[in-house]
Amino acid sequence: MRTTSSREVYRNPWIRVREDAIELADGSSSVYGVVEKPDFALVLPAERDGFWLVEQFRYPIGRRAWEFPQGGWPHGAGGTAEELARAELAEETGFRAGALRHLGHLDLSSGLSTQEFDVWLATDLTPGPTAREASEADMQQAFVTEAELREMVRTGRFTDAPSLAAYSLLLLDRTGGDPSA
């Protein structure tokens, strides 16, 4: 497969959409819509056999959603993946992590977007003030035990795909990568 042309369809400070004309292996033509968005960090703040979650209104799905803290650098800012994880954790929950461990790097939606994310386990948490963005003013946070989180997943109250993928990385990490353990 090769790209024969590309054009920008839409852009704002957070996202760029392009349309690529492509030639497939058999010589036929097709088109791809590609969403370009900066990478982000997702943090699992863990303590006392549970996790801190955040909940906020997510405009694209039209409802509030529980998830692990996550986000990207503000437009024009930058730093390392670990610095981003620490910044997002502090911004959304107020917690500072005494220990932060990288669990993995994932594609958000490889058939649609260039966006990827790093997953971090935050432990040895110290509370502090939040620094939420204006769009996060309605954000709430809550501590849930791991049993409660599993029940939220089972009953459809915890549906954020990146958060679920991050939790699966944690489960694999605990078993040394052996899913049958």
Image (cartoon, grey):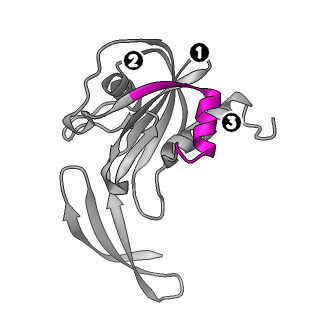
Seen in the image, is 106 located left or right of residue 58? right
- Neighbour tally class for label 1: few under 14, some 14-19, many 20 plus, Cα within 10 Å: few
Q: Which residue is mark 1?
A: 48
Q: Residue 132 colored magenta?
A: no
Q: Earlier in the sequence, mark 2 or mark 3?
A: 2
Q: Amino acid at mark 3?
A: Leu
Precedes in sequence: disc 1 or disc 3? 1
- Identify the residue at image location x=24%, y=50%: 14
Q: Is residue 149 magenta?
A: yes
Q: Residue flagged by tag 2: what amino acid is it?
A: Phe
For the question of whether residue 169 can be seen, the reply is: no
**Segment colored magenta:** 141-158
Q: Is residue 99 above or below residue 79?
A: above
User: Image height check: is 158 above or below 149?
Assistant: below
Find the distance from the CA under tag 2 to the CA under tag 3. 25 Å
Q: Which residue is mark 3?
A: 172
Q: CA distance from mark 2 to mark 1?
A: 15 Å
Position of 38 relative to 94 (above/below): below
- Label 2: few (<14), some (14–19) or many (≥20) C-alpha neighbours in 10 Å: many
Which residue matches tag 2? 95
Q: Measured from the top left, where is residue 23 in percent x and y?
A: 43, 82
Label 1 with label 3: CB-CB less than 8 Å: no
Within 10 angstroms of label 3, few (less than 14), some, or many (20 or more) residues?
some
**Residue at the image point whose x is 56% and y is 44% from the top:** 165
- For the residue pair 136 and 89, the one nearer the viewer reads as 136
Q: Secondary structure at mark 2?
A: loop
